[in-house]
Image (cartoon, helix red, strand yellow):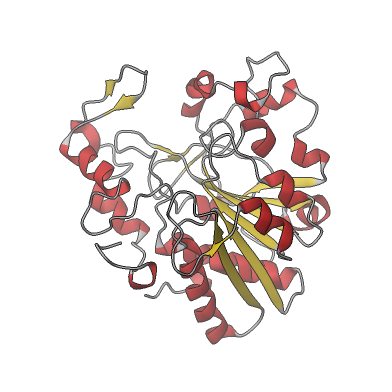
Amino acid sequence: MRMGATVEECELPSFYELLDRFSLFDSSASSGCDVQIGKNGSLFCKCEGCIRWSDFVEGRDPSDIEVKYEVFTREHVAGLACYLRTRAAEFELSVMDVLEVGAGSGRLSYHLNKYLSQLFTKNQGPVVRVVATDSGVRGLDGPSVKKEDAIDAISTRKTQIIISSWMPRSVDWTAHMRVQQSVLEYILIGETDNGICGCPWKTWGFSSPWDWSDSDDSDFDASVSIALQSQEDGSCLRESKESTNGHDRTRGSISSNSGSQIGRTRREKPLYEIDGWERLELHSLSRLQLCRTDERWSSSRHSHTVSFRRKQDAAACCGHTLSPGGWKIENSFSVEE
């Protein structure tokens, strides 16, 4: 977002252009990185390339001054628009309402609506309407964002799908989503499991494999699972019922903060399962994501797009490649700006 520009005036960057511009997930380009350990144990690099990437996500780049958690790209958002249209058709809805909570500037919802409008013009079919809401506490709410607290918006708006991108750490809105009868699915974008989005247990059903206590999420120490993040498990572009690690053919490896499979055995069932929901990773979208915690010197990719569906619906849909409606991003939608 340029200085003084609005969300409506700014185009989304291309995922592939950003990979090239910042040499992300490119081992040959990042060989000059000098990774150091900070006083708090965090890793950092102050080479020219890493400083440029840091400036970009922190909003210090003149080409885009918005501070970024998720770096929304044309390919990812266009793919999500395709996915939402397919879900509306699967739900047999002529009109489907989507709610984004914690929307900040409204950048995601604005561009989703833009792509959805293009899709409807080309193919007719279901109408999908996305409404962005934000509490305004951080002063990020844009002109097209409804000023509403997340819990209030979830409780009062009759919507079929809810989206939350980078839910605040140690905050869980998903329990409120699951009790709304109109809600058929919710989609979480950001770090999963022991990452910095939501609550490890309440949101993701993750508990540390070394945690033998019945402690609450507020006591969870994410640092104990860092060693588990380096695993890789081959290429996978299918929707799966659990977050997995996989090598990304575009570059880099998708890190889902693995260890959750071990950790979940410490407690009987994740809360979302008890409530009758299932979790499905949307790998075809996750592989097109970039976020502020991605680093040039690391092949790990930290942000994901994860669907939570009522069990009956998930059971009917999860056995298909990409989606039962065939929402293949590369073929069904031409990214236009």
Considering only vertical position in the picture, is 62 above or below 121?
above
| Image-quadrant location for residue 74 | bottom left
Residue found at x 44% / y 74%: 334
Residue 301, given in percent of the width and then of the height, sits at 43, 40
Judge from the rendering whether residue 251 lies leftward or rightward of residue 119; answer left or right.
left
Residue 263, given in percent of the width and then of the height, sits at 66, 24
Horizontal side, residue 281 vs residue 137: left or right: right
Rendered location of residue 332, percent (x, y): 53, 73
**Measured from the top left, where is residue 264 in percent x and y?**
70, 27
Residue 58 occupies quadrant = top left
The image quadrant where one finds the C terminus is bottom left
- Residue 181 lies left or right of residue 28; in this view the side is right
Residue 268 to residue 118: above or below: above
* Residue that appears at 30% across and 33% down: 297
Q: Is residue 191 visible?
A: yes
Q: Can you say which quadrant of the picture contains the N terminus?
A: bottom left
User: Does residue 328 show up?
Assistant: no
Q: Nearer the viewer, residue 85 or 153?
A: 153
Out of 28 and 56, give the one closest to the viewer.
Answer: 56
